[in-house]
Image (cartoon, helix red, strand yellow):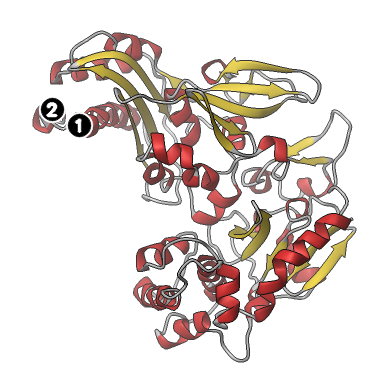
Amino acid sequence: MIKFILNDREVSTALPPGTVLLDYIRYEKNLTGTKIGCREGDCGACTVLVGDSCHDRLRYRSFTSCLTPLGNVQGKHVVTVEGINTEGLNPIQQAMVDESATQCGFCTPGFVMSLAGFCLSDKLPTQQNAIAAIDGNICRCTGYKSIERAAARVAQLLEDRNGTEPAEFVAQQQILPRYFASIKERLHALAATASPNGHASAQEVQRVGGGTDLYVQKHTEMVETANHFLLDKSDLQGITREGNRCVIGGAATVTDLAESAVMQEFFPEFRPYLRLVSSTPIRNMATVAGNFVNASPIGDLTIMFLALDATLTLSDGHTSREIPLRQFYQGYKLLAKTPDETIASIRFALPDERTQFNFEKVSKRTHLDIASVNSACCLSTRGDLITAASVSAGGVGPTPMFLAKTSAFLTGKAISEELVQEAAELAQTEISPISDARGTETYKRLLLSQLLKAHFLTLFPHLSPQELLQ
């Protein structure tokens, strides 16, 4: 039995825990303000908020309900557009009306929910942050400038928050209904009575993290599959520092990675790279380990952590073992793990002051798109001498690739335009791209060459772009 709070009411259901939240909301509860759009997490029409208690603070994140299994909302607070109604329009909805930010209105509930999630977050009340909150919402007919103006007005509503817990502030200011102020206590009470969510003990079980890929590929099948939900397992969460290493729990999400104090201290440039990974709602749901297990040849996080020489800890619940990420991929979608093993954690060495990292990605759209080719580069230097090099690339072979020959070639050599040109030529001998919907073989080879040069131009601005990019 799945129990959670839906808007202002506690609900329970005996539906299979693999049922998507969107279908439960619309067909079981008749809350039809949440729209059915793409069912792939792209359009944002089905956006809801999911709140839980994190370190004794109430935390809300926007989710695409079309990809969210009921098993991942056990014991949480789910908010639909019906759940943010006040007497008349709330200030977020009023801002959309006043700025003429809607026409047909199909996408509007999703935009409103994403902006409500911004109001319930700790993010600074800036127009930039408000607009970033709606990066997973698509409007086909209105035009985005009016929506951006509405977002700016929503940001102004939060200017007097001054450290007040967001849920308390929005309730006090009647931005959102007053019941939000009592949710934290209600979640604690629910946690004391809730039973664990659905999980089969058989070996033939589907392990589900955020579900952002599984529910695109196997939407109908997942409803009846024996599922083991990992997103809320406490032993798979957290991002910590252990000595000179960073340890990431397998269920940590992309948003967790972006908000991690450890990552912000040692990789201040990492957060902008993560903005290239899908959209805010998907980043809120998608797990780091899930990106690895997906085994996509162009998985953005996989390419990043190949360059960082990450090590995986695999566990079957009884024993555990470690394997370098670079040895994890044995062929297209073929992993060096058994069906009953889960990625429990990811570890990698934290950089020192001589280490620099860069990530590059080319896709048809800058955001919310799959890469044609992506690449990451991690270099340690002493003066102009490269003392260690790790270069990875995606979209240029059947698996995410660590470019071993190119990395070895760079190590021990002085930085120069000639060195970069030679490394780019050597990289061509390591890859085997194919022509597909994202580009021809020739195009992908050119992209990788240019991305390798972009790494060095970004990390070493004294190099001449005219000589490198000719």
Badge 1 or badge 2: first in the primary sequence: 1
Give the position of the N terminus as an image quadrant. Answer: bottom right
* Residue indicated by mark 1: 457
Q: Left or right: 199 with respect to 343?
A: right
* 10 Å crowding of disc 1: few (<14), some (14-19), many (20+): some
State the CA–CA distance, disc 1 to disc 2: 6 Å
Give the position of the C terminus as an image quadrant. Answer: top left
Q: Left or right: 13 with respect to 291?
A: right
Residue 346 appears in view? yes
* 10 Å crowding of disc 2: few (<14), some (14-19), many (20+): some
Q: In this view, does 297 lie above or below 93?
A: above
User: Which quadrant of the figure has residue 184?
Assistant: bottom right
Q: What element carries label 1?
A: helix
User: Which quadrant of the figure has residue 415?
Assistant: top left
Q: Which residue is drawn at 45% across and 48% down?
A: 369
Residue 119 picture location, percent across and down = 51, 69
Q: Please tell me the numbered disc located at residue 463.
A: 2
Q: In this view, does 355 lie above or below 289?
A: above
Residue 289 picture location, percent across and down = 61, 34
Say if mark 1 contacts mark 2, CB within 8 Å.
Answer: yes
Amino acid on which the number 1 mark rests in the picture: Leu
Residue that lies at the very extreme toward the bottom in this rendered image: 88
